Amino acid sequence: MEPSVTETAGASPEGAAKDQGKRRVAEHEAVALATQHAEAFEPRAERHDRENSFPFEDFGDMQQSGYLAAPVPRELGGMGAGLLELCQAQEALAAGAPATALGVNMHLFTVGLTAEMWRVEPDPRIEAFLRVVAEGQMIVAASISEAETSGNNFRHAATRAERTDGGYRVSGRKIFASISPVMTAYTTHALYEDPERGPLLVHFLVARDAPGLDVMDNWDAMGMRATGSNDIVLDDVFVPDETVVAERPAGVLDSFALSSHKWFNLTFAAVYTGVAIGAKRFAERYVSERVRKPYDQPMSRFPSIQYLAAEMEIAIETSRALVWKTATDLSQRADVSERDFARAVAAKYVASRNAIDVVDKAMSAVGGSGYLRRSPLERLYRDVRGAKVHPPSHYDILEIVGKAALGVPLDADPRWA
């Protein structure tokens, strides 16, 4: 994480230079690892997509290399990668293995958010969690999506919590729980009707083997098939107070929700940008080698192909510039305003639309062979469609950005007031 204003105030030039050097090391280490993993994972991606199987070997490699601990502060055993560095690394990973990158992002953004919380207010429980992640002993799946409430909703929950001695009893069903096949712990939220404080959203961490927690085997989607985004059923699961992350009023967008959206949206924007980069690379290689008779020069010599390549290049650089700039700005402070939140989802909106457009253009450049199942482009064409439904989606984002621009509270009810 970039240092806050309070952290840098009064710091010596020598200290600031040293901190900057440490951040450069973290950036290079995380991105270099992601690039290496992308090269190794890419040949496996087609098989996992076709079989609708989970890439356990990818996660074994990332666990062994320490990539799963990239956002953990260095002093706790990780790489110290902040929001910007994580976006850069996830973009590189997604360029080779989109589904693996999308899946592991649920773990990484959660760890990144938790690391930021620890830096702002050190807590022994959070520190213990981060150290376990750094030791490679924990892989966290995160999902708060429900069929009843829809999408990435930090304001409501259909899943219910009841107070009991030493914690809560939680029952409900969550959807789109990516990397559920390999998770060792799961973080989500439930609604608790507190008799004194009113409705509360209880955010918590629970072990994979907790009695009453059942991971379904029901993920069968158009694209991103290797994410293992199964449903999770919670049937009277006991959540001890020690693993409760936050208790916050329901129905509001507070600092916890806004910071969560910051990490969530920017890292996922980077993932879909990476998918676009992978499609562009494939198309460029193809047209540089393919010769269409009666011509004796490769397709890359055709002006129409050059125009498509230019449009893909411009779209990717636009997304990258916006995502990286927004991540840089928002990394400089832990507290996120509604305008900051709007900037984060706007970056995801632009990156998602550009990613879909780039993959479409790559398909146009390659032509009919890209439509065949044996082509990596066919898989990327399906994978990138996840950007359309990844919450918050198109019109929800426009509403958030529009309200922030007009000064209308984002959690104002009724919604269309």
Image: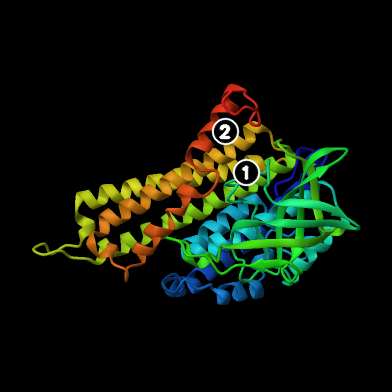
For mark 1, does the 10 Å Cα neighbourhood hold few (<14), some (14 to 19), or many (20 or more) residues?
some
Side of 78 relative to 32 (left or right): right
Q: Quadrant of residue 80?
A: bottom right
For mark 2, does the 10 Å Cα neighbourhood hold few (<14), some (14 to 19), or many (20 or more) residues?
many
Locate residue 409, reporting x and y percent: 65, 27
Of the numbered discs 2 and 1, the one sitting upstream in the chain is: 1
Q: At label 2, which amino acid type do we have?
A: Ile
- Residue 76 in view: no
Residue at 25% over, 65% down: 369
Side of 100 relative to 160 (left or right): left
Identify whether 241 is placed above or below 121.
below
Q: Which one is in front, 398 or 149?
A: 149
**Between marks 2 and 1, how big is the CA–CA gap?**
21 Å
Residue at the far right: name it.
Answer: 165
Residue at 37% over, 60% down: 281
Q: Which mark is residue 328?
A: 1
- Residue 290 in view: yes
Locate residue 134, reporting x and y percent: 74, 67
Identify whether 413 is placed above or below 211.
above
Q: Which one is in front, 399 or 237?
A: 237
Residue at the far left: name it.
Answer: 294
Q: Secondary structure at mark 2?
A: helix
Q: Which one is in front, 325 or 374?
A: 374
Q: Secondary structure at mark 1?
A: helix
Q: Which residue is mark 2?
A: 400
Residue at 76% over, 61% down: 236
Q: Which mark is residue 32?
A: none
Residue at 48% over, 53% down: 272
Locate residue 50, reporting x and y percent: 41, 72
